Amino acid sequence: MTITDHAAHYASLQLASLRARLDAQLRRSAGAAHADDPALASIERELLASRDDDTLPARWLRTRLALSETEEQILWLLMGYEVSAEIRGMVMTLAGARDEMTIDLAERIVYGEASARGWRELGSDGALVQLGLIRSEGQPVSGLSRHRSRIGLVPRARGLLHGDAQLSDELRELARYVEHEIPLAEVVTAAGVSERVARELGKPRPFIIATGADGAGRATLLRAAAICAGTTVIDVSCARLATAPDALSAQLRVIAREARLFRAAVLLRDYDVLATTDVVAWLVDRILVDGTREPILATAATRTNRGGGARHVVEVKLPPLDGTRCAELWQRAVPMASDDDARYLSSTHPLSPSMIHAVGRRLAETVEPAPTGATVNEAIRFAIDDRLSGLAQRVEVTQSWDDLVLPEDQLDLIRELLARVRERRLVYEQWGFSTKLGKGLGVSALFSGPPGTGKTMAASLVAKDLGLQLYRVDLAQMVSKWIGETEKNLAQLFDAAESAHAVLLFDEADSLFGKRTEVKSSNDRYANLEVNYMLQRLETFTGICLLTTNHENAIDDAFRRRLAFHVRFPIPDEPERAALWRAMIPESAPLASSIDFTGLARRLELPGGHIRNAALRAAFLAAAARSPITMDHLWHAAAIECEAMGKIVPSRASTL
């Protein structure tokens, strides 16, 4: 940043004053009599006249950080030592030809031979060190070692003295400076939430934590409220802050300094990720919360009991949006949509505010003047894929309900599950049942049964019928050998699923939802902790979670009690097997007239998954022979599936 003529003149005055004072000290050390310097007196009068001119970078810096006159002089001394060969030479002469600036030398030049104030202001607890304006190497523990402790300006202090009024480069990867946000009146939240945040910001030194699901608009609300109140915001990503205490302390000091410089509120996004230990919470309180007067804002999934310092912490909860407010967001994201379209989208895709905004941005990038239903659905899929990237894979569903053959009792349970999802808003919101439950209002179900009985297909059809995307959880990405990492990954997964309103599928769920064991080793203890976390998270989950298992008894009893539905998939009986054989052959496939599906079903006891495999194998055999699919092809393919299952293949002759 180019320094102004006014600021350059002020800097030249400071350096001229420094040279005059150094010259006087050199003459005194040589035994010369003290004599008033008219030139220095003139410089000091001009500097005094600029004392309240906050347009000068150095004076602005001193005012905002509440620095003393001597602390400002220290900064100019270090600046002069760096940029002026003349000043450097004078300092070296005072130091006995040593070319280094030490604490005791700076103290002699600015404060005199001995000064309690100099000790305090140049010590590790002084403002210059605490605010990260000077660096100190070999910080002394006693006066005897002060001459060995070198000090110098940090780049940020040098830039500030030259008029650099941008957010420090030290925060480039950690934070951003926010001066503009959507008007507070346009932030869509539950009734009364915005007004409450605005009231709290009007109080002295507020500390406000906005809690709620990821993507619920917590950070947007806090930024908008702060800017509406007349302050800018330093938006900090807590996930990017260091975890080691020394490194974290340095980062927090920089944040505190910048907040004081710009009189900006500090927004700690994902504060619960940061305040995980008492040590970290204490550092945040000491350096940032109690070390500044600016508003402290934070977002978290839930209220943490740690932190707050001397401030009164206020929690503002952001509940999921009701249908009306969700429709309002959809109307903004898809401006061409009618009121009915917006209500339909809010019903079928009650995504989080951040997800709806992402869909809107995606649609704005398309070349079509008016989005169609297809382009809106594509934008929704793109936003959800992006949100769940690395956590789960989208399952493409091509089957229909005609492909699923189950007893009527099991189909009734699945129909009830679908009704539970579709009518949630009516029952929980309009009829008020949410006030009676007090837990997560999600829907969870366990599909259990032998392999190949249609569990995964049923989960796919449930998602398809609801018009939602199904995502199969990548268990390899979830489970970690490092302590606490599995829970962290699962938290990220459930938060993303709630934000995206996606259906989660845990195939072979017993690997995560298995029974807790007697603790005989540390591995058992940490495995049980993972199960306990899953129990808690499933209980508060507001989305749709489907679990499949081949081993029902392996699932922890506490999980089964928390599941809204448990559908047991039996081995199909003979009529069901015959129906499955028919369902697996597409109408467009060439089929010989002599096919006996009833005979196949009677003689070969195969579950649906193996019938599907056999039908596909038979189709390729027929295609290779350039013939329709015959009974020979089907029998041969089915016999291979029987052998794969370890079953004895009956003789073909006894089939018909």
Image (tube, rainbow, N blue to C red):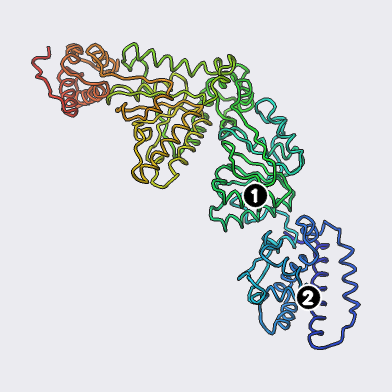
Q: Amino acid at mark 2?
A: Gly
Q: Who is closer to the viewer here, 220 or 126?
A: 126
| Residue at image mark 2 | 112
Q: Which mark is residue 359?
A: none
Crowd around label 1: few <14 · some 14–19 · many ≥20 (10 Å): many
Quarter of the image where the C terminus is located: top left
Camera sees residue 378? no
Which SS class for mark 2?
loop
Which SS class for mark 1?
helix
Dot 1 or dot 2, earlier in sequence: 2
| Residue at image mark 1 | 285
Residue drawn at x 82%, y 65% is: 10
Camera sees residue 570? yes
Q: Are marks 1 and 2 in contact (CB under 8 Å)?
A: no
Q: Is residue 633 above or below residue 524?
A: above
Q: Who is closer to the viewer here, 379 or 119?
A: 119
Quarter of the image where the N terminus is located: bottom right
Give the number of callouts.
Answer: 2
Crowd around label 2: few <14 · some 14–19 · many ≥20 (10 Å): few
Q: Is residue 229 above or below residue 319?
A: below
Percent x, y of residue 576: 26, 13
Q: Who is closer to the viewer here, 562 or 406?
A: 562
